[in-house]
Image: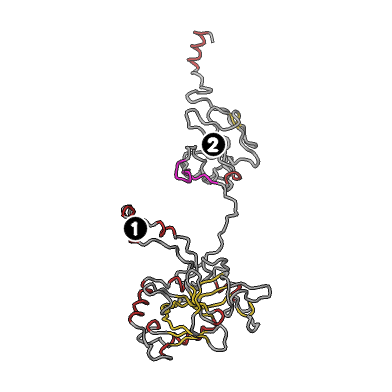
């Protein structure tokens, strides 16, 4: 982190500026600008180096670090650095002097982190880079998982931070030190005090590159058994402020996969029984659509069915029962002709006929059933169906055709009087 600019002392603030009130422009303006790694302990090159949030490095002068383990990640973290054209892990090497950021990582124990630069899979157990043989070890040329595992620790290091402004450091424990860490932590199980109540010494294993081990400082110096009251207060403040949550990845979120773009065509709209717009408004009123009941029997001429013909089909649901006469079955391929007009018309005074339904191709609806033609309006003449005989036309209501003649006596009297 670069040196901060020099600012005047607070006591020199003029009264006319104090009277304007306090503002938070600088504080709120920092939002989104602090994209940086948390403070951590580097073990690169076989030496400890403290790296602050600004990237400044301070080599640790001792071959070990005495610290307090204040937090541990609840799951094993995974990190994928990439694989070169020969199958070797490209970047990460505990003994290297430097390395770049990982391609993918996970602190949630399920899948790639949503914060990973290039997340590889939504589940680590199904990722191609988590299987053995997906990469080659540079130490012994043996097959290893390209995605390595590690444990994250939150450390308080005495003397590494300014007094009164202490913060924790992250330590990434590599997979080759997993057994060393487990051996140390299991020694506290069942005791009345936890690992955060004592001083821990972390050091390198002699002759094994990149491997670190853990022990109590008390093992080497009996003066350091439990932590002192000042250190206890500092570690409590760190945990109460949840300063280690980000270090150990406790808030990591699983990546949900790439965003899917819909490629299927939008289905054609269908007209509901009570049409309404997507926004909730009502569409312009339209005539009621034709009924969707099963097909009614064909309408023929008003003649009784022939002897031996099957009984007439049952009327459509909702029609009056027991009032209609049976209709003869329409001959195959014949449609009752109505002349004139060529199309059905509504009786005088009746409501207008409904519009034709939309075609299935245009509306996306299934093909409607074949409906029979409606009865012809009064006063029209229907052509007979082939194979049947049309009855004589009926006279209008109230008119008697072919009335019976008067009695013979009356007829004789009329003839004498009128000469008919």
Pick the front one: 297 or 420: 297
Q: Residues within 10 Å of mark 2 (few under 14, many from 20)?
A: few
Residue extent of the magenta highlight: 269-282
**Mark drawn on residue 355:** 2
Q: Main secondary structure of the magenta part?
A: loop
Residue pictured at 45% horizontal, 70% vertical = 246
Q: Is residue 279 visible?
A: yes
Distance from Cα at disc 1 to Cα at disc 2: 83 Å
Q: Residue at x 49, y 8 (%)?
A: 417
Asked if residue 8 is positioned above or below residue 335 in the image, the reply reads below
The image shows residue 362 at horizontal and vertical percentages of: 59, 43
The C terminus - image quarter = top right
Tell me if residue 390 comes above or below residue 207 in the rendering: above
Whichever of callouts 1 and 2 sits on the residue coming sooner in the sequence is 1
- The reply to whether residue 308 is in sight is no
Inspect the magenta stretch and tell me whether residue 273 lies in it. Answer: yes
- Image point (48%, 40%), residue name: 283
User: Looking at the image, which is closer to me, 332 or 218?
Assistant: 218
Point out residue 131 in the picture as x, y percentages from the top left corner: 60, 77
Percent from the top left, x then y, of residue 167? 41, 73
Percent coordinates x, y for residue 243 in the rendering? 41, 71
The crowd level at tag 1 (other Cα within 10 Å; few <14, some 14-19, many 20+) is few
Residue 210 among those drawn in magenta: no
Specify the farthest residue to the right.
86
Residue under pointer 1 = 13
Question: Does residue 336 appear left or right of residue 57 in this picture?
Answer: right
């Amino acid at each position: 982190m670069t040196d901060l600019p020099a600012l005047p002392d607070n006591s020199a603030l003029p009264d006319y500026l104090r009277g304007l009130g306090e503002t938070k422009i600088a504080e709120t303006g920092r939002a989104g600008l602090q994209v940086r790694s948390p403070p951590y302990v580097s073990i690169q090159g076989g030496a400890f180096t403290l790296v602050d949030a600004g990237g400044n490095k301070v080599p640790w002068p001792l071959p070990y670090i005495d610290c307090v383990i204040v937090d541990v990640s609840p799951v094993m973290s995974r990190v994928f650095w990439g694989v070169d054209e020969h199958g070797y892990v490209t970047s990460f090497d505990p003994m290297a002097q430097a390395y770049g950021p990982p391609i993918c990582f996970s602190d949630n124990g399920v899948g790639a982190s949503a914060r990973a630069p290039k997340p590889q899979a939504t589940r680590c157990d199904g990722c191609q880079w988590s299987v053995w043989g997906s990469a080659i070890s540079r130490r012994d040329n043996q097959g290893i998982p390209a995605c390595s595992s590690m444990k994250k620790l939150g450390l308080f290091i005495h003397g590494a931070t300014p007094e009164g402004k202490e913060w924790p450091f992250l330590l990434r424990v590599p997979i080759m030190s997993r057994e060393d860490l487990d051996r140390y932590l299991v020694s506290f199980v069942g005791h009345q005090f936890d690992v955060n109540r004592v001083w821990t010494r972390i050091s390198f294993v002699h002759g094994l590159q990149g491997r670190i081990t853990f022990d109590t400082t008390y093992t080497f110096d009996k003066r350091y058994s439990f932590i002192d009251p000042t250190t206890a207060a500092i570690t409590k403040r760190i945990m109460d402020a949840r300063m280690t949550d980000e270090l150990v990845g406790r808030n990591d979120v699983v990546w949900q996969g790439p965003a899917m773009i819909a490629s299927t065509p939008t289905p054609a709209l269908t007209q509901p029984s009570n049409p309404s717009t997507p926004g909730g408004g009502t569409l312009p009123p339209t005539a009621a659509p034709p009924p969707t009941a099963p097909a009614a029997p064909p309408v023929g001429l008003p003649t009784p069915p022939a002897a031996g013909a099957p009984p007439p089909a049952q009327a459509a649901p909702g029609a009056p029962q027991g009032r209609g006469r049976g209709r003869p079955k329409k001959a195959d391929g014949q449609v009752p002709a109505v002349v004139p007009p060529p199309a059905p018309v509504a009786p005088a005074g009746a409501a207008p006929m409904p519009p034709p339904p939309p075609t299935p191709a245009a509306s996306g609806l299934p093909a409607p059933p074949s409906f029979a033609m409606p009865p012809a309006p009064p006063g029209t003449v229907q052509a007979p169906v082939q194979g049947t005989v049309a009855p004589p036309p009926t006279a209008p209501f109230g008119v008697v055709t072919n009335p019976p003649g008067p009695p013979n006596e009356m007829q004789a009297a009329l003839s004498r009087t009128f000469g008919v």
